[in-house]
């Protein structure tokens, strides 16, 4: 099986996120290299007040 690799500069991915907040692949890659300016989209936590997800840090590095 042959895999095709495509390389993108982080700056260009962050530009894609600014242009299209729904570009999930670019967002994940861009934010894994550091924060970008502001939020992508508007927070809508108030729509689901009963939802209380576990933080990623608590799953990956639980406190003893």
Image: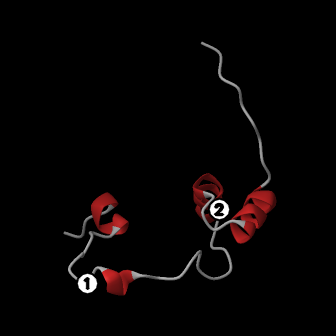
Q: Taking 54 as reference, is 36 left or right?
A: right
Q: Secondary structure at mark 1?
A: loop
Q: Nearer the viewer, residue 44 or 8?
A: 44
Question: What's the mark number on residue 58?
Answer: none
Looking at the image, which residue is at 74% across and 62% down? 16
Question: On the image, which quarter does residue 2 sit in?
Answer: top right
Q: Which residue is mark 1?
A: 49
At which x and y percent is residue 7?
Answer: 77, 41
Screen quadrant of the N terminus = top right
> Mark 1 or 2 closer to N-term?
2
Mark 1 crowd level (few <14, some 14–19, many ≥20, 10 Å Cα): few
Distance between the alpha carbons at the discs numbered 1 and 2: 30 Å
Looking at the image, which residue is at 24% across and 70% down? 63
Query: In the figure, 29 relative to 38: above or below?
Result: above
Q: Taking 25 as reference, is 46 left or right?
A: left
Mark 2 crowd level (few <14, some 14–19, many ≥20, 10 Å Cα): few
Q: Secondary structure at mark 2?
A: loop
Q: Judge depth for marks 1 and 2 and give the one in front.
A: 1
Q: Which residue is mark 2?
A: 33
At which x and y percent is residue 41?
Answer: 57, 77
């Amino acid at each position: 099986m042959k895999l095709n690799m495509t390389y993108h500069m982080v700056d260009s991915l962050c530009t894609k996120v600014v242009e299209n907040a729904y570009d999930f692949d670019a967002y994940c890659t861009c934010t894994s290299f550091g924060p970008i300016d502001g939020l992508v989209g508007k927070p809508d936590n108030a729509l689901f007040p009963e939802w209380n997800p576990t933080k990623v840090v608590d799953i990956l590095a639980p406190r003893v």
